């Protein structure tokens, strides 16, 4: 009979892997900087332009690089996941330093913000996929669910601390000093990422010089298309990014200012509320995730996420909205953590970078979702827009579960292996 320690590994077992001990704080620093930057600039655009449409355009710019995400996956498979991730984070640090310099010189304008956000958006969407692929390359398969849950805390804790810190720094010190912190976090992430993936379990870099990058990308796309559960997950991810993520993330500045009539601090508390729920969900999954079937958990989490965001659209006051957003955050984790874990666990190691790159391509759903939301909110209001998004998303998620039920819902499906 297996011992309890064999059947239920320690929550912090992934930290026994040297690479993960460096990667986790590197990802944490990056995520903190992401969240501070998004909140600071989103509020700046809304205040300076007084336009929800321009706010959604700004948010959309952060995702334009999703079209390049598969190629980042190809480069990671060819040149090494850590090397590509390091190069990306050097770009973040450079752009943040540029923004900081413009702010200190008092010449920063919305045009500068849009331009720098566009450049950042070419690279940033691929970060989540590359960090997940690096975890997959350095972590034993039995610890992937736990590792992805802990890795997820870098994003959720960043939303809590990053949102509150970013709002407080801008309110107390101004935009330029706040960007000193952002640039410092990016620089720290570069240093720590250089240390990740360098342990004994790290893969040897295999340069596929005999084939072209485009052929590698085509090969990865064929692999995803020929694998039913991968096709289903990619479609579901696109739908979530088009409908759920805009409501949960990018539109919060509008909700805070125009619906709940609060300020930057109120926005920080709203963002932190959703992130606190997501963090709580991730921590529970890190300990008890082995008791659930990943694909089933993913589908159930998606439905709950939509349900809570629908309720959130009709909350009468800030306090009630915060509580519902907290519950939506828990549902968010129960959909996203198992999605990442089952992708990493079920793909051929040779295609891991490319599959995660294609997964990041699905983030492009944010662009049409945000742009359409901006126009709809202007014409029919936030509550009705959120209702349309949630009901449509739930319908599509239900159809995906029904069509691919033998691959996603059946107890004996490979992706439901505990």
Image: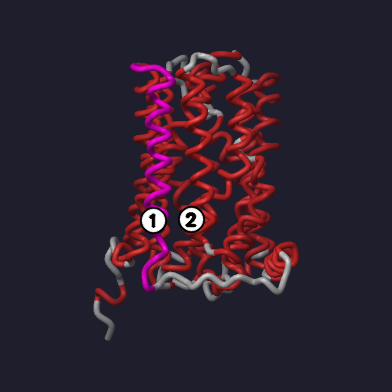
Nearer to me, 207 or 225: 207
Please provide the residue range marked out in magenta.
Answer: 172-200
Any part of residue 398 in sight: no
Above or below for 251 versus 215: above
Residue at 63% x, 42% y: name it. Answer: 122
Q: Is mark 1 on a helix, strand or loop?
A: helix
Q: Quadrant of residue 326?
A: top left
| Residue 310 percent location from the top left of the image | 55, 35
Number of the label disc, if any, that sits on residue 23: 1
Above or below for 407 versus 365: below
- Horizontal arrangement in the rendering, residue 246 relative to residue 335 (left or right): right
Q: Is mark 2 on a helix, strand or loop?
A: helix
Residue at 55% x, 28% y: name it. Answer: 251
> What whole-number distance in Å separates the C-alpha atoms at marks 1 and 2?
8 Å
Residue at 39% x, 56% y: name it. Answer: 23
| Residue 189 percent location from the top left of the image | 40, 46
* Residues tagged 1 and 2 counted as in contact (Cβ below 8 A): yes
Quadrant of image for the C terminus: bottom left
Nearer to me, 144 or 256: 144
Nearer to me, 126 or 394: 126
Disc 2: which residue: 131
């Amino acid at each position: 009979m297996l011992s309890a320690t064999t059947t239920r590994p320690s929550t912090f077992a992934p930290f026994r892997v040297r690479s993960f001990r460096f990667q986790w704080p590197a990802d944490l620093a990056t995520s903190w900087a992401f969240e501070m930057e998004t909140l600071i600039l989103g509020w700046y655009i809304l205040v300076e332009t007084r336009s929800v449409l321009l706010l959604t355009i700004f948010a959309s710019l952060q995702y334009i690089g999703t079209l390049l995400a598969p190629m980042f996956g190809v480069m990671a498979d060819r040149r090494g996941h850590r090397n590509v991730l390091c190069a990306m984070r050097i770009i973040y640090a450079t752009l943040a330093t540029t923004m900081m310099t413009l702010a200190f010189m008092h010449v920063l304008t919305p045009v500068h913000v849009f331009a720098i956000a566009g450049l950042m958006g070419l690279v940033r969407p691929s970060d989540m996929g590359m960090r997940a692929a690096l975890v997959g390359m350095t972590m034993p398969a039995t610890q992937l669910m736990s590792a992805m849950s802990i890795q997820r805390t870098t994003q959720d804790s960043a939303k809590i601390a990053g949102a509150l810190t970013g709002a407080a720094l801008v309110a107390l010190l101004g935009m330029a000093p706040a960007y000193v912190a952002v640039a410092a976090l990016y620089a720290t992430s570069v240093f720590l990422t250089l240390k990740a993936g360098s342990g004994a379990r790290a893969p040897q870099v295999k340069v596929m010089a005999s084939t072209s990058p485009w052929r590698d990308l085509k090969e990865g796309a064929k692999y995803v298309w020929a694998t039913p559960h991968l096709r289903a997950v990619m479609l579901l991810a696109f739908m979530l990014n088009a409908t759920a993520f805009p409501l949960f993330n990018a539109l919060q500045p509008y909700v805070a200012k125009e619906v709940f009539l609060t300020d930057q601090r109120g926005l920080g508390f709203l963002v932190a509320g959703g992130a606190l729920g997501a963090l709580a969900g991730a921590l529970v999954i890190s300990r008890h995730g082995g008791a659930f079937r990943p694909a089933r958990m993913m589908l159930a989490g998606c439905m709950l996420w939509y349900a809570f965001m629908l309720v959130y659209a009709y909350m009468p006051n800030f306090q009630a909205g915060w509580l519902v957003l907290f519950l939506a955050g828990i549902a968010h984790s129960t959909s996203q953590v198992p999605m990442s874990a089952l992708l990493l666990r079920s793909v051929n190691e040779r295609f891991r970078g490319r599959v995660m790159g294609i997964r990041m391509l699905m983030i492009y759903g944010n662009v049409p979702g945000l742009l359409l939301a901006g126009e709809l909110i202007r014409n029919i209001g936030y509550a009705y827009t959120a209702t349309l998004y949630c009901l449509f998303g739930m319908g599509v998620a239900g159809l995906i579960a029904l069509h691919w039920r033998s691959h996603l819902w059946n107890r004996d499906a490979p992706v439901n292996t505990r």
